[in-house]
Image (cartoon, helix red, strand yellow):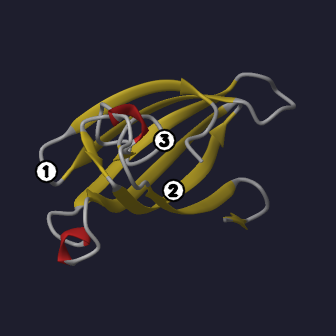
Amino acid sequence: RYFALHGNDQVVALQGYFNSVYGDVPFYKLSTVGGKRLLRGIGHPYKYMGSHAWLAQAEYRRYIWWRLGAVAFAGIGNVFNRFDSAALDKMHVMTGAGLRFRALAKESLNIRLDYGITNRGDHALFIAIREAF
């Protein structure tokens, strides 16, 4: 969900995510958090894996000058194997900031530089094209 503030110069973006797999699933199809889109403070997308994953994240985007922008983001989530208290145990809390450069003046295609950290000692730097969500 996206909410424009003061025209299109500022945006608040919200994302909720849930993934669940059952049965004998190959490890690369397990539910994960981390990487350049889901809880960006975790550098490797396969570091935390399980049968189920949930997360919620928010991002504040602001135009600065010319084609440059900045963002601040935060999120919380977890991976787990059983639907019990494990879903809320040892949650990953992430926060970070980034810069944006609009590659094409009339299009919303951004090149982004994001840095995030988590409460569990993870941190990551990403350079990517397009927004995380």
Residue 125 in view, yes or no: yes
Q: Quadrant of the N terminus?
A: bottom right
The picture quadrant where one finds residue 22 is bottom left
Q: Which residue is mark 3?
A: 37
Q: Looking at the image, tell me whether mark 3 or mark 2 is earlier in sequence order.
A: 3
Please name the residue shown 44% across and 51% down the image: 72
The amino acid at mark 3 is Arg
Residue sitting at the far right: 106
Where disc 1 sits, the SS reads: loop
Residue 21 lies, in percent from the top left, at 43, 54
Mark 2 nearby-residue class (10 Å; few <14, some 14–19, many ≥20): many
Q: Camera-side residue: 48 or 69? A: 48
Q: Camera-side residue: 107 or 20? A: 20
Q: Is residue 19 above or below residue 1?
A: above
Q: Camera-side residue: 81 or 57? A: 81
Q: Looking at the image, tell me whether mark 1 or mark 3 is earlier in sequence order.
A: 3
Residue 129 marker: none
Mark 3 nearby-residue class (10 Å; few <14, some 14–19, many ≥20): some
Where disc 2 sits, the SS reads: strand
Q: Is residue 12 above or below residue 115?
A: below
Q: Nearer the viewer, mark 3 or mark 2?
A: 3
Residue sitting at the far bottom: 85
Q: Residue 95 vs residue 102: left or right?
A: left
Residue 73 lies, in percent from the top left, at 43, 53
Residue 45 in view, yes or no: no
Please name the residue shown 51% across and 56% down the image: 59
Where disc 3 sits, the SS reads: loop
Q: Which residue is mark 2?
A: 59
- Whole-angstrom CA distance, mark 2 to mark 1, is 20 Å
Residue 120 marker: 1
Q: Nearer the viewer, mark 2 or mark 1?
A: 1
